[in-house]
Image (tube, rainbow, N blue to C red):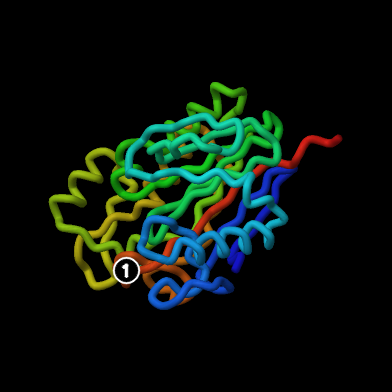
Amino acid sequence: MIGHRSDANGAHFAFTDRWGGVSAVPYEELNLGGAVGDDPAAVLANRAAAAGALGLDPARVVWMNQVHGADVVEVDGPWGDADIPSVDAIVTARPGLALAVLTADCVPVLLADPVAGVAAAAHAGRPGMVAGVVPAAVAAMTKLGADPARIVARTGPAVCGRCYEVPEAMRAEVAAVEPAAHAETSWGTPAVDVAAGVRAQLARLGVRDVEDAGVCTLESRDHYSYRRDRTTGRLAGYVWLNREET
Ligand SMILES: [Zn+2]
């Protein structure tokens, strides 16, 4: 259920795998995505189960309507009856509020400055990485008092640069913006390494504590991969800060 989990001074980071939920084929088992054709009741049950495994209240987990852009919104609590905003990054200074990002090959990026008490989650696919969604998230965190030098960054399971084949022209287009993303597949054709692009962006901003889950979704049967399966579920990444002591 929870494939990767780490903690740093009161900041918590977790990424799910595909097992331990109630979704039926082809979404089996722990699909957390609400817009992929799965039974909504199964998605709700899975979200509750994943939150429970993390010690979180599912009502205090904030999701995004992800659109492959670079917009960021600050969030103070659950959306309630409000429309879920169409953004690819959310940032909060609210302890105990979990921010969640959905992926199936794109790079889920979790960020936190435990000292400032600021966290962010970002969805960085190829277009989002090129558009700068991760630098935008770091900028939004900085506005709330975070210091890039203190930010802890965790990137989750995603398609790797040896598997993410793209046309030559697309690789050139991406590399013109982010040279670090220039890659080649294991079979020798043009590719893009989105995670490498994200790491380069974070390094330029002065974020030094960066760790990757080290899992390629396309190669791992324990993870959802859109490029491998097309109709499939979504993994989630969660970041949250300790609740205030009462
Ligand atoms: Zn791979």
Q: Residue at x 64, y 57 (%)?
A: 51
Q: Is residue 74 left or right of residue 217?
A: right
The percent position of residue 210, horizontal first and vertical second, equals: 55, 47
The number of discs equals 1
Query: What quarter of the picture does the N terminus occupy?
Result: bottom right
**Residue 149 visible in the shown view:** no
Q: Residue at x 52, y 33 (%)?
A: 206
The percent position of residue 172, horizontal first and vertical second, equals: 18, 47
**Residue 178 visible in the shown view:** yes
**Front residue of 53 and 223:** 53
Q: Amino acid at mark 1?
A: Thr
Task: Decide: is 81 above or below 167.
Answer: above
Residue that badge 1 annotates:
231
The percent position of residue 230, horizontal first and vertical second, equals: 29, 68
**Front residue of 122 and 199:** 122
Q: Is mark 1 within 8 Å of ligand 1?
A: no
Disc 1 on helix, strand or loop? Answer: loop
Q: Quadrant of residue 189?
A: bottom left
Query: What quarter of the picture does the C terminus occupy?
Result: top right
Q: Residue at x 38, y 75 (%)?
A: 26
Q: Quadrant of residue 234?
A: bottom left
Q: Residue furthest right?
A: 246
Q: Is residue 75 left or right of residue 9?
A: left
User: Callout 1 environment at 10 Å: few (<14), some (14 to 19), or many (20+)?
Assistant: some
Task: Decide: is 204 above or below 218.
Answer: above
Q: Is residue 169 left or right of residue 164?
A: left
The percent position of residue 25, horizontal first and vertical second, equals: 41, 78
Q: Is residue 149 left or right of residue 162?
A: right
